[in-house]
Amino acid sequence: MPSDDSDLNAELLRRRAAARRGGGRRAIEKQHARGKRTARERIAHLLDPGSFEEVLPYVTHRHTAFGLDEKRFPGDSVVVGFGRVDGRRVAVAAQDFTVIGGSFSEVQAQKVCRVLDLAVAAGTPFIALNDSVGARIQEGIWGLAGYGELFWRNTQASGVIPQVSVMLGPCAGGSVYSPGLTDFVIMTAGISHMFITGPQVIETVTGERVDVDTLGGAQTHAAVSGVAHFVAADEDDALGITRRLLSYLPSNNVESPPRREPDDDPLRADPALDSLVPPDGSQAYDVREVLGRIFDRGSFFEVHSRFAPNAVVGFARLNGEVVGLVANQPAHLAGVLDINSADKIARFVRFCDAFNIPLVTFVDCPGFMPGTKQEHGGIIRHGAKIVYAYSEATVPKIAVVMRKAYGGAYIVMSSKTVRTDLVYAWPTAEIAVMGAAGAVNILYRKPAADDETARERFVAEFREQFGSPYAAAATGYVDDVILPHETRGKLVTALDFLRGKQAAPLPKKHGNIPL
């Protein structure tokens, strides 16, 4: 006889409970003993309470090799679904370390690909919570094919929806390429690690000895490789960073970034700005203090803070509107551009352009880093990425020249000639092919060498004639010379005017970015 409704309901509840147990009580206890949450606990902590809706909770793998027939768990090694963060829709996939170490399997690939497809179709951000030993070796080609399917979808979703990878445990081998393809990587200090090959393999193949943290820890990837955009102190911090990051991002590439009701005077003028930047170009200052005084109070959210610190990038709000900030950092290497800072700036500019985030650039740069290491490392190719990114960007673009803007660095840092909409300069700005002292040494070698008084006169004349912001303004390549305390009001007015800027259609499929 067919079962009655109560039997059917009981069966559903039994299966649902089994799916939510993951790898079982003992595996969950081991996860907690490591100081880590389970996949479902992480999702609950990230999303708005009660908003998570799971999909594909009952799928199991089909493989039997090496004991896999005895390791079938409903939902396999990942939990996927959708929910809300601060009321906004998101899709999420959380690897479940309690199920075969969260190993990447054919089924895990199917589930993550499915929810990523749903995210693209619905136009919602995708968040991956990663904690896995790596590929499930017993599945062979099926697991490898799963990697390929996921990487393809990461690529297709790139520039369509924001993709964020939160590293809450190990990530090794082929698994690192999915986070590497996403827009932002958040690593957790002391817990998360990323590497293609582990320390044992490296020692076997090369004889080099290295520990896990030095090889692929959070600090390494944040400061050395640039793979990680943020470092979190613990899981709570990692999920908190994720929520804050999402608050600056639109849900997809046809929406505008989320606006907040401003609580700061749009025309607020800060007199301290007028003396914050030393007129002497050899004196350092922290550009982050400049940004903090111009944009909505407490809104600056730096990205990639530990990587290439001679450049600063991040998000902020201006009268409640989200903007992307790029700035040279005179407090580190005098704000010079090098290979790493070029990559950092170009990637951030392209992200902002893809997701309709206006760009504001603050310039104080003496040029590109000289030396054989930079030249042989491809500074020409890497530097070209900056000019390519700015030239290609169609969002509103505004630049403020604070002090030095020399040579090629002036051109690539959002100059008028790469189609920046508005360029402002402070009275301390010096825009020239090179610094006045260096130019005089080349142009007036004998007087400069023999007569210090003449040299000083030539330097002053060169600075006035060629480096002055008023000389640049006279050509039209600077739209206005403004006092530093006027900057906030000028930017608010300019962005309001440029809000309706339309991207011109391009008669080509795509260009060939320097790589």
Image: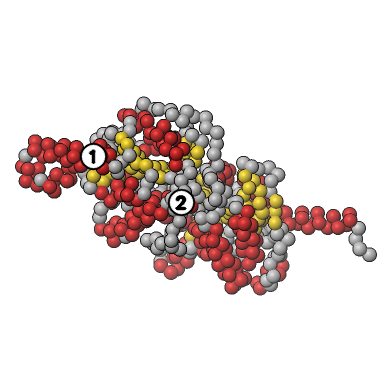
Task: Judge left or right: residue 113 versus residue 55.
Answer: left
Q: Residue placed farthest to the right in the image? A: 1
Residue at image point 43% right, 61% down: 507
Residue at image point 70% right, 51% down: 53
Q: How many marks?
A: 2
Residue at image point 43% right, 35% down: 493
Residue that badge 1 annotates: 471
| Crowd around label 1: few <14 · some 14–19 · many ≥20 (10 Å) | some
**Residue 447 % position (x, y):** 7, 43
Q: Which amino acid is tagged 2? A: Ala
Task: Judge left or right: residue 24 versus residue 272.
Answer: right
CA gap between label 1 and label 2 equals 31 Å
Could you tell me which quadrant the N terminus lies in?
A: bottom right
Helix, strand or loop for disc 1: helix
Helix, strand or loop for disc 2: loop
Which callout, 1 or 2, points to the residue nearer the camera?
2
Mark 1 or 2, nearer chain start = 1
| Crowd around label 2: few <14 · some 14–19 · many ≥20 (10 Å) | few
